[in-house]
């Protein structure tokens, strides 16, 4: 799993960069910092402004506008739902004629900007928009664009009491509802990367009425069953998952990876050719798997800045539980009594994949260190409506190549466009 692993390796990288930049290890959030640190951040902002770009700037760099809609979930979270708009399109007016809606849902520690990092001719989101689809980008609770709540603040522990279960059961239905109302459609296409699929299956199993409103689910590297996760560091870290979550929550630090310009700057510096470029690439490949030959490693800091965004401790913690239990089930309170209180039974309930009615097209890879083919094949054996599956033949192909490798257009996106046209 990417969570604890990314954290561990990130800390190592940042420490190396810090030694290089300041002569002393230095870590921290934004806030009162040394003047030197601020000067370094300032310099990196000038040298590499793309590291600090949000979704609007990334979209506009490729000639698109981006609308921001606010979605209110049943449990009071206020999420930002983005929608691509070609600059010439009038923002208001007849919403019905913008094409078939497609909802793209990011993975762990990511946000809507995940889909906007590659050029227009090899990013799934832009290609879909150019083909006339109405492209919506989710921001699941806790990420930098979905940190508001009707009554809680991010300072409250209760705000962070969620994992991908709540993203699936509350965030996705609320996003889908807004999209279907705005477009006056009955159903939409759903594309998830990694945890975007975990949340999808949680939603489709727990809320089959909502799941039925998906025309076709496209699962890229679906992280659902985790028993065979190839990543050794993640396997080891998973054993301490519950303990880490409890420790973070009891020390009032339930948020992982709060925004930090200093972290972004240090990532950039640590991946410079004269710093530790090799370590930077090694870290990247230890996290996600060996990269496709066409992967451009000088973009690692740019990507890393956009895949190390805030979430709750419970989000990777819930994955850790799946690694240990080998099942796809709800949050484990850690004791029979706790589960009895929450679920009326000593063990957390499994998600019933038999209730998933929408068709799925599943794409996975032998080289993905975060999601094992064995686990994906187990998932597909339990789901009744898998209409297409592809184990990527183009190798090696890691967890992020699904998004970032130029050849993904031929390998993945062309089959996806054909499927969307069929359903
Ligand atoms: C978290 O929320 C669940 C219900 O969604 C509740 O049962 C549990 O007690 C809460 N835990 C904490 C620590 O707030
Ligand atoms: C890799 O990315 C860098 C930074 O954007 C760019 O300057 C370079 O031309 C790219 N290399 C290739 C082979 O595309």
Image: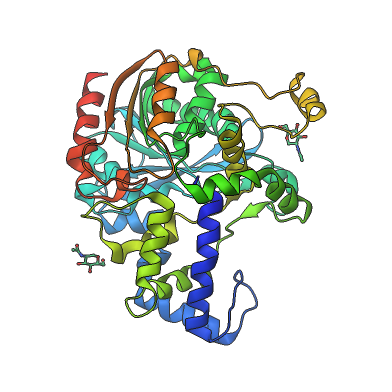
Out of 31 and 326, give the one closest to the viewer.
Answer: 326
Out of 316 and 37, give the one closest to the viewer.
Answer: 316
Say above or below: 2 vs 216: below
Q: Position of residue 203 (x, y in %)?
A: 53, 25
Left or right of 420? Residue 188 is right
Q: Is residue 72 visible?
A: no
| Residue occupying image coordinates x 38% and y 27% | 183
The image quadrant that residue 304 belongs to is bottom left
Q: Position of residue 406 (x, y in %)?
A: 21, 50
| Residue occupying image coordinates x 48% and y 83% | 21
Q: Is residue 77 visible?
A: yes
Q: Position of residue 267 (x, y in %)?
A: 45, 69
Q: Position of residue 1 (x, y in %)?
A: 50, 44
The image quadrant that residue 421 belongs to is top left
Say above or below: 333 vs 112: above
The picture quadrant for ligand 2 comes to bottom left
């Amino acid at each position: 799993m990417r969570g604890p692993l990314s954290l561990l390796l990130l800390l190592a990288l940042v420490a190396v960069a810090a030694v290089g930049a300041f002569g002393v290890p230095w870590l921290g959030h934004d806030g009162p910092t040394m003047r030197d640190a601020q000067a370094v951040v300032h310099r990196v902002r000038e040298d590499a402004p793309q590291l600090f770009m949000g979704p609007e700037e990334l979209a506009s760099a490729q000639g698109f506008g981006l609308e921001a809609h606010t979605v209110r979930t049943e449990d009071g979270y206020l999420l930002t739902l983005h929608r691509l708009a070609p600059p010439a399109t009038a923002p208001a007016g007849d919403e019905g004629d913008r094409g078939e809606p497609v909802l793209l849902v990011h993975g762990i520690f990511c946000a809507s900007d995940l889909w906007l990092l590659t050029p227009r001719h090899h990013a799934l989101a832009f290609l879909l928009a150019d083909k006339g689809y109405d492209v919506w980008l989710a921001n699941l609770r806790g990420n930098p664009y979905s940190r508001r709540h009707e009554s809680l603040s991010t300072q409250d522990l209760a705000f962070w009491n969620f994992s991908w279960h709540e993203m699936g059961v509350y965030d996705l239905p609320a996003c889908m509802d807004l999209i279907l109302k705005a477009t006056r459609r009955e159903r939409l296409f759903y594309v998830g990367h990694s945890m975007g699929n975990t949340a999808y299956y949680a939603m489709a199993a727990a809320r089959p009425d909502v799941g039925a409103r998906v025309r076709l689910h496209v699962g890229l590297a679906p992280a659902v069953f985790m028993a065979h996760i190839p990543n050794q560091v993640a396997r080891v870290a998973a054993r301490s998952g519950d303990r880490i979550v409890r420790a973070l929550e009891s020390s009032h630090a339930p948020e992982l990876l709060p925004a930090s310009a200093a972290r972004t700057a240090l990532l950039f510096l640590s991946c410079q050719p004269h710093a530790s470029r090799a370590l930077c690439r090694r870290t990247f490949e230890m996290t996600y798997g060996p990269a496709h030959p066409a992967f451009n490693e000088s973009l690692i800091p740019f990507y890393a800045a956009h895949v190390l965004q805030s979430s709750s401790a419970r989000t990777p913690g819930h994955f850790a539980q799946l690694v240990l239990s080998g099942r796809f089930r709800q949050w484990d309170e850690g004791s029979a009594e706790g589960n009895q209180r929450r679920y009326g039974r000593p063990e957390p309930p499994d998600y019933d994949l038999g209730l998933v009615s929408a068709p799925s097209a599943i794409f996975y890879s032998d080289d993905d260190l975060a999601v094992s083919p064995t686990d994906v094949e187990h998932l597909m054996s339990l789901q009744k409506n898998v209409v297409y599956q592809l184990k990527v033949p183009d190798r090696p192909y890691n967890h992020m190549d699904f998004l970032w490798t130029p050849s993904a257009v031929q390998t993945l996106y062309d089959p996806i466009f054909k499927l969307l046209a069929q359903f």
